Amino acid sequence: MSITQQQRQSNSRTFLAIFGAFFLLPGLGLLVFQAIPNLHRLFSAQNLGADEFEAIVAAAIVGLLFSLIGGGAVYWGLKKPRDKVELLDGDSPWLGRKKWACASIKDSFALTGGLTWGIAVFWNLITAPALLAFSEELNKGNELIYLVLAFPLVGLFLVIQAIRKTLDWRRFGQMTLTMAPYPGAIGGDVAGTIHLPTALPAGTPFTVALDCVRHYTQGKNSSQSVVWQHRGLFEAQQSSRSTQLPFLFAVPADLPPSSSADSSYHTWTLAVKAELDGIDLVRQLEVPVFPTAEKASASLRLNLKAVSDIASNAAALFANNTGPEQAIVGDHKNKGFGTGVLIGLVFLAIGIGLAYFIGHLQNETALIGFGALFGSIGLAIFSYSMLGYFRRYYLRLAKPLLECRYKSLFGGKLVTLNYQQISAVTTESRGSMTVGNKHYQFFNLGLAFKNGESLRIGERFSRQQAEKTAAALAQQLGVAVTEKSTRPSRLHQ
């Protein structure tokens, strides 16, 4: 017998309440029996030993945090559900979700900002005892205490992020999306108008991206993969007090609809970004998309003002057959580069610290080996990120010849081909990546030869750029575009 959405939500709320109780009860115990009875001693003239002082402060902080976390979980578990669960299993499941109950959907940016502040405060509170003990441990000659300084740096980063979200909210306010058609239509259009309660400069281009993402669980691991992704540049309609941005995406008919959280489910996300002086606008909404095949109205299409994206104007790359070689650079090329470099350096630093400053100086062989392993992983991640960043592909069309050049930190290779050798231009999905709440799907560009071999000529494209670039190149070569399921070689390097 299949489990209904109502039963799933009831089970989830029960589990959340029980889980919260395991935090709430110990937290209240620490506050009631340890922290509160001794709190007056912190402010009295009575001298306290360092151990007593730290014990009282730690009990107060841990008790407060456990009580807040556990109390919040119990509250949300016992709270009456906002969604109409009986509608989630019906013919119009979007009506069962309170946030989708009408065509106007508001973002939850204020809640996200509040959670960011909460996490920042939580992190700084739990690291406070370690900071209080810093001077004392340093005086004892414990040089390992320097590692504690990494934690307040993380806390400072979280506070900066919270401040940025606060400034974003004060400048732009709450974003509202009015969908038309409602809900968004698979086999039709996902379209509507985005409203901001503040006037932005005239002519500001907005990048709007629509993502379909699959969320799934394998054992204890949760993963995400991009099923479909599209983006566009649109110009807003201006007024003296607000900004309205019409947008439209045509959605293929073979994509999955929005579904409720489960071991495997799909979400559709609309992301809006505008680069401005000072704080940039970056917002995201989960939207309902179902197979209704409805189209956008003629009035919305009339108000729609799409902006040409010069960076994705692929035809310009091949406009001059006799010109110099052109770099074929994917618009997702640098996505994840900074994260990879940072993670690599952090692992490398930890490895060096464990291997030399702890293992070597204290003659601990196991720590030397463990540090060497950490350092090797960090060096591998750092090297892979740097190699990818400096890897470049270049093309030059000089009919009947095509020159493809590959360059990297360790040299490169030039391949010269005759148009007659090429059977097709290929695109290939190479996976996806999630950075924060942003999803990126990567495509490679290649050439298929009549002898069955293949050649990569570009990497880390978005779907949109890969399709445009492949179509423009195929037109120049007089061949077709095919989607490839196997991985092409990298210039046989």
Image (tube, helix red, strand yellow):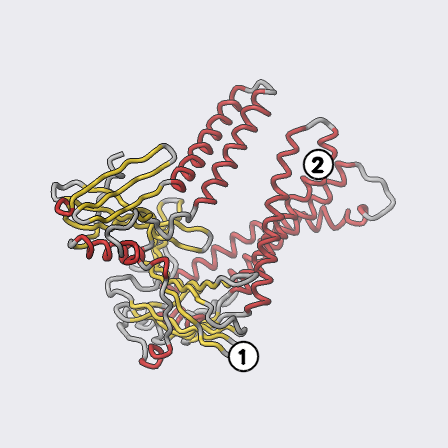
Contact between marks 1 and 2 (CB within 8 A): the answer is no
Q: Position of residue 278 (x, y in %)?
A: 57, 61
- For this orientation, the residue located farthest to the front is 322
Instruction: Name the quarter where the C terminus is drawn.
Output: top left
Q: Quadrant of the rendered structure where residue 267 is? A: bottom left
For residue 359, side relative to residue 247 (left or right) = right
Residue 322: image location, x then y, percent? 25, 50
Q: Which residue is mark 2?
A: 134
- Residue drawn where x is 36% and y is 54% of the image: 215
Q: Is residue 214 visible?
A: yes
Q: Nearer the viewer, mark 1 or mark 2?
A: 1
Q: Characterize the local packing of mark 1: few (<14), some (14-19) or many (20 or more) Cα atoms within 10 angstroms.
A: few
Q: Amino acid at mark 1?
A: Ser
Q: Which mark is residue 240?
A: 1
Q: What type is the residue that disc 2 sits on?
A: Phe
Name the residue: 32% across, 35% down. 412
Identify the residue at image location x=73%, y=27%. Answer: 140
Q: Position of residue 289 (x, y in %)?
A: 34, 67
Q: Residue 4: x and y, percent?
A: 35, 63
Q: Which sits earlier in the primary sequence, circle 1 or circle 2?
A: 2
Tell me which corner region of the image, top left, top right, bottom left or bottom right, holds residue 246.
Answer: bottom left
